[in-house]
Image (tube, helix red, strand yellow):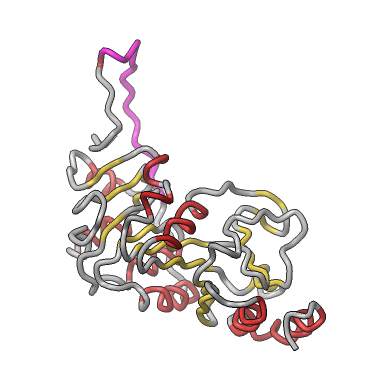
Amino acid sequence: MPRSIGENKIHISQVEAFIHHNQPLHELPEIPVRDIDQKIAEYVAERIDHGSTLQVGIGGIPNAVVGLLSNHRNLGIHTEMLTDGIYHLVQQGVVTGAEKKTYKEKMVATFALGSRNLYDFMDNNHSIEMLTVDKVNNPRIIAQEDNMVAINATTEVDFYGQCASETVAGKYYSSTGGQADFGTGVRFAKNGKGFICLYSTAKNDTISRIQPILAPGSVVTTSKNDVDYVVTEYGITQLKGKSIYERTNSLIEIAHPKFRDELIFEAKRMGFLI
C-alpha cells in the first residue's frame, strides 16, 4: 500500500491487532479512448481555462479530456477519485494547484484507483491530501474554489435536463457517487462549470439517450436545477438559465440525427415546442 498523506492516520495504540499480508493491489486496466470519446472530450477541454480546479472520474471520456489538457497551466485537483490521468498531468507539469483557494498547491482526493505507477506516485507524496469524503464531496467546500470544473457521465437526459446516472432503462445499476455533490458545488463556485457527458445512443444506435421523459423507474441523480452543460458527440449545450423550450430545442440539436424528428414530434405533443 502507498503511504498516503492527509487526515487518514491512526496511531499504533489505536490498533487492537494487525496482520501482515503481501498481495499486489488491484489495478484498473487501461481504458482505451475511442473516437466518440475524443469528440466529446474536445467540446469539454476547449472550455477548461488555465488555473481551473478539476473533478474527473474514470472511463474513456474523462481519459480523453485529461489527454487534451497537456498545454494547460496551473491546473488544480479536487476530486473524489485519483486516476492515472491526473498522474500523467502532474508528470507533464500541468498540475500545480497554484491558483487554488483551498488546500493550495495540494491535490485533494478521498480514494484512488489505477495502475501501480499511480500508487507509487502517491507514496509519501506530500502534494496529495487524502481527506474524508464528507470534506472532499462537501458542496460548501467545493464552492470555495474559483473556476471549479466537474466532469461526469450519465446514461439518460430528458427535456427538463434531469440526468439519470444510476439507472439504465429504469433499472438500478450504480449508486450516486460524487456527481450530485460536485454538481451542486460548481453551481455556487465562482466561474464554476459542470459537464454531464453521454453518448447520444445506446444498443447499437437503436435507443436515444436524450428522451422526452426519463424511463419509468429512473433515478434523478443531477436535477434540472443543478445541470450546467450537457455534451454528446454531436455537440454541447449549456442548460443553466434556460427555459424548458430552450432546453428542449438545444438538447434535440445534440441528439443523434436519426432520432431528432421523433424527439421534435414528442416535444410538440408535450407543448415544449411550438
Most frequent secondary structure within the magenta stretch: loop
Residue at image location 69% in from the left, 84% down from the top: 260
Q: Is residue 244 left or right of residue 44?
A: right
- The quadrant of the rendering that contains the N terminus is top left
Give the farthest residue toward the right: 269
- The quadrant of the rendering that contains the C terminus is bottom right
Q: In which quarter of the image is residue 190?
A: bottom left
For residue 7, above or below residue 63: above
Q: Can residue 111 be seen in this view?
A: no
For residue 38, above or below residue 89: below
Residue at image location 68% in from the left, 49% down from the top: 172
Q: Position of residue 146 (x, y in %)?
A: 31, 63
Q: Is residue 210 left or right of residue 104?
A: right
For residue 119, above or below residue 180: above
Residue at image location 66% in from the left, 70% down from the top: 160
Task: Tell me how many marks there are.
Answer: 0
Q: Can residue 163 be seen in this view?
A: yes
Name the one closer to the observer, 107 or 146: 146
Q: Where is residue 255 in the image (x, y as percent from the top left)?
A: 62, 80
Q: Where is residue 153 in the image (x, y as percent from the top left)?
A: 52, 62
The stretch in magenta equals 13-28
Q: Does the magenta stretch include residue 20?
A: yes
Q: Does the magenta stretch include residue 182?
A: no
Q: Position of residue 238 (x, y in %)?
A: 51, 76
For residue 260, above or below residue 26: below
